[in-house]
Image (cartoon, rainbow, N blue to C red):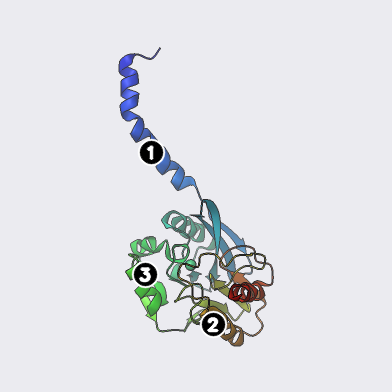
Amino acid sequence: MMTDWMAAGIRKLLPFIVILFCIGTAHAQFQIEVKKHSNSIYIYESYGAYQGGKVGANAVIFVGNDSVVVIDTPWGNDQTVQLLDWIDTEIKKPVASFVITHFHDDRIGGIDILKARGIPAVSSELTAKLAVENGIAKPDVLFKNDTTITLAGGKIEVFYPGPGHSPDNVVVYFPSEKLLYGGCFLKDASTTSLGNLGDADVTAWPVSLEKMKKRFLKPKMVIPGHGGLEPGAIENTAKLLDDKKD
Ligand SMILES: [Zn+2]
């Protein structure tokens, strides 16, 4: 039987119990998923809460001969720790750097973990500027518009097509696999929405898209920022932008 003093004690502790429970569930909420594409490319998905639902974000792990380069951090610190643990256990090679494709949380949300572990974050000058303006830590290695990262066992081309989903969005091409990672600049083949347009430039986006298509003529595989990986991401992005005009 519960005595009055026990009940009073529980009432006093209740707010703390609720807070502890919330912290516990927030930490356990999302679990990254990694899929092998080839010996050098893994595609991973992290998750975030967006408009009351759970949304996945695609990104890429490139495995070179002696080191790993990751394109985009997972969506937040916890999942970034999960990803680094996964690389430690499964790949067993040091992470040379992370390339950040724009300044939103689903791309840069784990930068504090990178800072804490001394892993360089690479981004354009514009992404760094927007990150700082939005209270996010500044990436460590900056490039002007485009850059190429060469590591033993591979080459990674980073290209700025112009504004689209955000003013600073870049896309990443892996020539060895002819794989084009569009990040949030590209929508998946079956979505009917352009997604978060808060920082988008829908007038410039189609022009930027044409620039990207001219630069990377026949990619074998295209990875959009969110959603499924079936073919047609570039075509669907163009269509959604075209519909937006009417
Ligand atoms: Zn974004």
Residue on which the image places disc 3? 131
Mark 1 or mark 3, which is nearer the start of the sequence? Answer: 1
**Is any atom of residue 82 visible in this view?**
yes
Mark 3 or mark 2, which is nearer the start of the sequence? Answer: 3
Q: Amino acid at mark 1?
A: Leu
Residue 175 rendering spot, x and y as whole percentages: 59, 81
> In the shown orientation, is residue 184 left or right of residue 18?
right
Label 1 residue near ligand 1, CB within 8 Å: no
Query: How far is the residue under mark 3 from the one under mark 1?
Result: 31 Å
Quadrant of the rendered structure where residue 3 is? top left
Quadrant of the snapshot with the N terminus: top left
Q: Residues within 10 Å of mark 1 (few under 14, many from 20)?
A: few
With respect to residue 113, does 158 lie above or below?
A: below
Query: How far is the residue under mark 2 from the one under mark 1?
Result: 47 Å
Residue 35 rendering spot, x and y as whole percentages: 61, 61
Q: Amino acid at mark 3?
A: Ala
Quadrant of the rendered structure where residue 179 is? bottom right
Residue on which the image places disc 2? 208
With respect to residue 7, does 41 lie above or below?
A: below
Residue 46 rendering spot, x and y as whole percentages: 52, 58
Q: Nearer the viewer, residue 112 or 200?
A: 200
Taking the spot 38% from the left edge, 79% from the top edge, the residue there is 125
- Disc on res. 58: none
Mark 1 or mark 2, which is nearer the start of the sequence? Answer: 1
